[in-house]
Structure formats: C-alpha cells, structure tokens
Amino acid sequence: MEKVFHHLKQLLALKPTTRPWHLPLVAALCAGGPVLTGAVVGRIDLGITACLGALVILYIRPVLPIPQRMVMLTVCSFGFSVCFALGLSTSFNLFLSAGTLGLIALLATAITRYYALPPPGNFFFVLVTALANTRPFDLELIPLRVGLITLGGILACALAFLYSLSLSLSLYLAKKPSPSPLNPLQPNTEKQYKPRVPTIILESIVTGSFVGGSYLLAVLAGLDNPYWVPISCCAIMQGATFTMIWHRKVHRILGTTIGMVLAWGILSLPLNPWLLGGVIILLNLVIEFLVVRNYGLAVIFITPLTLLLADAASTWDHTEALILTRLLDIVLGSIAGFIGGWVLHRSRGFAWAEKKLLLMTDDKPPEG
C-alpha cells in the first residue's frame, strides 16, 4: 500500500521549473498567430495548417547562444516541412503511409537522441506526420499545404529571433550574466554523456516499429483516421525509464479522459474563427505552463488542442462520436507505447542485442 501511495504522489506532484514565465506566452502567441491570420483572410483551414509549422517554437532553448538557437529552430522547422510533405505524399496507401510514419519516427528518434535534444524530442515530428496522414490525398494541394507549414515555421523562427533579441537586451540592461552556452548541434562528447550509437540505433528501430505498426494495426482494425494511436505510442515511449513510461501511460489515459470532457465542452460552443484562434492560444499557454510541471495535467489541455488542429473541419456535426473514437485511439496507443517501453527497458532480447552490438563496436556494454 505504501508503494501505491508513493506512485500516486509521483503522478500528482507538481515539479519545480526554472522556465521563464514569458516563454509560454511567446509560444502561445506564435501558435495562435496563423489561426488568427486565417480568420482575417477567411480561410481558417489554412491558418490551422500553418499553425502546425509554428509549433516548432516549442523547440526553442533560451540557454543557447542566439546563433545556435536559431540554427536549431531552422533545422527543426525544415524537418517539420519534410515530415509533412512525406506524410501527404504517401497518404494514398495505408502500408506506405504507415511505413513512412515508422521511418520518420525512427530517424527523428535517432537524430534527437544522438544530439541529446531535450523534450519534446521526436514527438512533434511524429505528430506532424501523423496529422498529414489524415489529409485526403490530393497531389495538386501538396505544395500549398507544405508551403503553409513552412510559413508557420518561418513565423516561429522570426518571433523566436525577436524574443531572443529582447531577452538579451533585457539581460544586458539589467547587467545579468547570460546563461551558460551549450552546443547541442555537435555530437555530444562531454564526459557526462557519450552517445552510444548502437543503443540509439536499436531504440530508434524499436520506436519506429511500434509507432508505424500501431498506426497500421489501428487502420486495419477499421478505426477512422486513428492519428492519435501513433502519437500516444510515441509520447509514452519517450519515458527514460520503465517507471516513467508507466507514469506516462496512466497520465495519458486519465488526462485524456478528462480532456475529452473539456473538448466536448469547447466543441459544443458556437466557435467562430476568432474564438477558435483565442481558444488555441489559451490552450497552448496553459499547456506550456503545465507540461514541465505535470505531464498528466498538461494532457488534459493537449487533448482538445490536438482535436482542434486535426479535426476542425469535421467536429461540429459529430462531436460525441469523434470524442469516443479519439478516446479509443489514445487507449490503444497508450497500450502499444507501454509494450514498446517494456521492450526497450525490460526485455532480455533488447538487452542481449544491445550488448552484442556494443561489443562489436568496441564500446563498453552497460552493466547488468
């Protein structure tokens, strides 16, 4: 019983954070800007698409020097565009789209792990690809849609640059020292962390297999556009330990259940384009304040936000059916992610393969 209370305490605990209060505000305005622009021109659907590209602002790291910070954001923005383009280009075939999603999950995991990129890591690359798979295949619209994602990324980079300049100026005027410079754009060779390439390759293969496989199985099972299955699978497999993966599974299911009630309330409102933009800004703001403190609380607000970004064109007439379908998606994705996490952290087969590869590459295998 004492162990149960310990786990419950960890699930509900609010972690301390050193994140500045203005960073979530910038991220929220950046994500909502394209939606409000779409409201101005009368094409809210285009604004929502561009909003996906603007989510790259979540990869900003104020501790980096401005040049490295902007290079990292630009590279991530380019990655968003490539992922979205590949997702759109292969959405006409189930097996091809599932294979593309798995390949992107594999590559995104390998790159973010090798360069020690902190959370959200590979998550949004998988999310962008999964949402692209939900779009009906239309060869003529691919350039427009990819261009909108790119424009959203450009907006995010521009706002990040202005934010970085204002932050540096405020530190200079206050005569405060700048944060210690880091360099995540080179393979990390510091003593406290040395990337194990064979381990990263194995983890990436397992992650890609489970993310792509979960999407394939969900579609073959007859679920309608089950984009949240691979998204949930990827989110849970991000846990650094099996205990963290278990916590993420519980957080994901409970947070989503509560979040669906919130989503039902939001989608029941007579949302006009301006109100929709305001809701997206508010949800992003709350998420960015909570995600570093408690993942489960953040999921409550991530749920309606993802619904708005992915199903804005189809939510108004079938809200109840849509919410039940997405809830089933997340339960299935969470189970798949939990199994994938067990394979990564508890299975003897993975440990054996990792040890063999490390010995073949003359690297020191992990103890135990």
Image: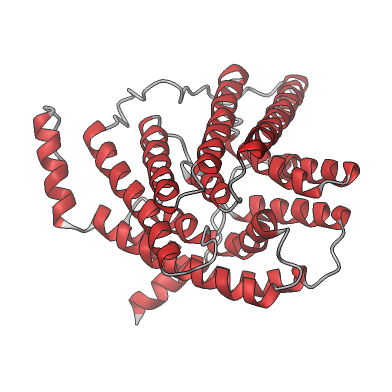
- The answer to whether 305 appears left or right of 269 in the picture is left
Q: Position of residue 312 (x, y in %)?
A: 72, 58
Q: Which quarter of the picture shows residue 138?
A: top right
The residue lying toward the viewer, choosing from 306 and 358, is: 306
Q: Is residue 367 visible?
A: no
- The answer to whether 228 appears left or right of 356 in the picture is right
Q: Position of residue 319 (x, y in %)?
A: 70, 73
- The answer to whether 212 appears left or right of 55 in the picture is left
Q: Is residue 90 visible?
A: yes
Q: Position of residue 291 (x, y in %)?
A: 58, 54
Please determine whether, in this image, residue 104 is positioned above or below residue 207. Answer: above
Residue at the spot 37% in from the left edge and 77% down from the top edge:
4
Residue at the spot 39% in from the left edge and 53% down from the top edge:
211
Please determine whether, in this image, residue 105 is positioned above or below residue 326. Answer: above
- The answer to whether 4 appears left or right of 35 in the picture is left
The residue lying toward the viewer, choosing from 302 and 12, is: 302
Please determine whether, in this image, residue 273 is positioned above or below residue 56. Answer: below
Q: Position of residue 240 (x, y in %)?
A: 36, 50
Specify the color scheme. secondary structure
